[in-house]
Amino acid sequence: MIRDRNKGTVRQPRGAQPERLSLEYYEFQQPIVLMPKNNIENDGDSGDDQEQGQEQEQEQEQEQEPEQEQEQEQEQEEVKDEGRMAQLDIDGIIYEYRQRPAVIEEEEGVIEFRVVNNDNSRENLIILAGLKNIFQRQLPKMPREYIARLVFDRSHLSIAIVKKNPPLTVVGGITYRPFESRRFAEIVFCAIASSEQVKGYGAHLMNHLKDYVKTSSRITHFLTYADNYAIGYFKKQGFTKDITLDKKIWMGYIKDYEGGTIMQCTMLPRIRYLESPVMLVRQKAAIWSEIRKRTKSHMVRKGLEYFKEQVIKAGHDPDTITAEELAKLDLKPIEDPATIDGLVESGWAPEMDEIARRPRRGPHFAAMQHLLSELQNHPSSWPFAQPVNKDDVADYYEIIKEPMDLATMEHKLESDHYTTMEEFLHDARLICSNCRQYNNEHTTYYKNANKLEAFLNSRLLEMPEYAHLAEE
């Protein structure tokens, strides 16, 4: 529910009205239909009565939409939504990348993207009514009247995904409010029809919005309030919870949604978002080109025939021999690996085999890792999980000269600092002794230290090879 935290009512944005804007045509390689250039009035709610009448008329035209959606859902069940692989030739090398079904449908003319606002034209009003219905269905907790008022508000713009068959069938869209002088826009609503949410419509829609806003205005940032279900989507579209835009720019201008998480997207001026898949392929090609200049990793050499020849000599067919039969054969290793084509050129040296055969961890590593995990999961270990914060306990490091904690122990263990179990146990017991030294014996911390150390000793007694290290 959208409520004012102080009054508990639907809240309107504060601050000055946005300046007058105009929609300009912008060019895409992929087809997109835009409304003609038209000044947008900023009369706020002055046209509410007219908009309500328009809304009623458009709702009548949309009465059959649920039945149409059911038919479309049945059709979509038969359509594969994996997209297709597209190819790009760069310097004679073919690179493949996946095209979303939404991109394919736009190229084939199944869908189109329209930027619309309430200019009283019949088609735009039909599309806005369709958007309103989508938002009301997909955002059931949002007041229906509130959605209708903002969608038809002339200070808001919308970009809609429109199917051409049946004509003017809206399957999703975004409604946003531009604040051009402040160089940001607020995304108010964003939704895709439930039957169309597996085709990449959401990502493709956001790319269209970014490219349109960049080319038609001075806006560089988006702000939006996302509920828990939408945070993942917005993160994938480049939004973050880290708001770097100065609060003086947006505070009081965007609508405040209780329970929502404010997120920000900063658009990159040199990126054309609709072409991002091709851009990434070109970057990949550039990286591979540099790798080929420095290494021979791209060269594919003939496979080894050595072991195949031994199988043939043993009287077996290499193509049909079973794993059991292969295990019984006395296959001899290659005497001189340096004779393998390309091995030396790749940087191999005999010493590398010796290093590879050495055990990576010491003989006590597994036991120490298991003990540390049990200590970290013990109910009394919470005071010792991380180093003591000197800002919280100012004199701690003046009294404790050799601090220790479980996180530091984990780092030392993973870095192979512990060569013996005794070294590991020294640090574990140091945690408890430091706690008892600093805290009074009646404190919770002191008691937790005793419980944790008692648990450590009990676990050591259960391990025969380390039982002698337990303390009474």
Image: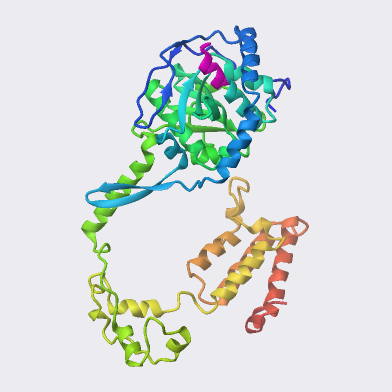
Rendered position, 104 above or below 64: below
Question: Residue 196: x percent and y percent?
Answer: 56, 38
Residue at the image position 30 percent from the left and 46 percent from the top: 88
From what the image shows, is residue 425 above or below residue 28?
below
What residue span does the magenta drawing correspond to?
118-128
141 vs 33, nearest the viewer = 33
Q: Is residue 398 left or right of residue 461?
A: left
Q: At 61% across and 17% down in the image, what residue appears?
A: 58
Residue at x 41% of width, y 13% of height: 37
Q: Quadrant of the N terminus?
A: top right
The quadrant where residue 107 appears = top left
Q: Is residue 407 above or below residue 159?
A: below
Q: Quadrant of the C terminus?
A: bottom right
Where in the figure is residue 124, as x and y percent of width and height?
52, 17
Q: Horizontal placement of 88 versus 469: left or right? A: left
Q: How many marks on residues?
A: 0
Q: Locate residue 233: give its quadrant.
A: top right
Residue 120 image point, x, y percent: 53, 11
Question: Residue 310 at what x, y percent from top left?
Answer: 32, 89
Q: Quadrant of residue 50?
A: top right
The image shows residue 293, relative to residue 319, as above or below, that is above
Q: Is residue 246 magenta?
A: no
Q: Horizontally, is 228 left or right of 354 in the view?
A: right
Q: What kind of secondary structure does the magenta stretch mostly adopt?
A: helix
Q: Is residue 82 left or right of residue 195?
A: left
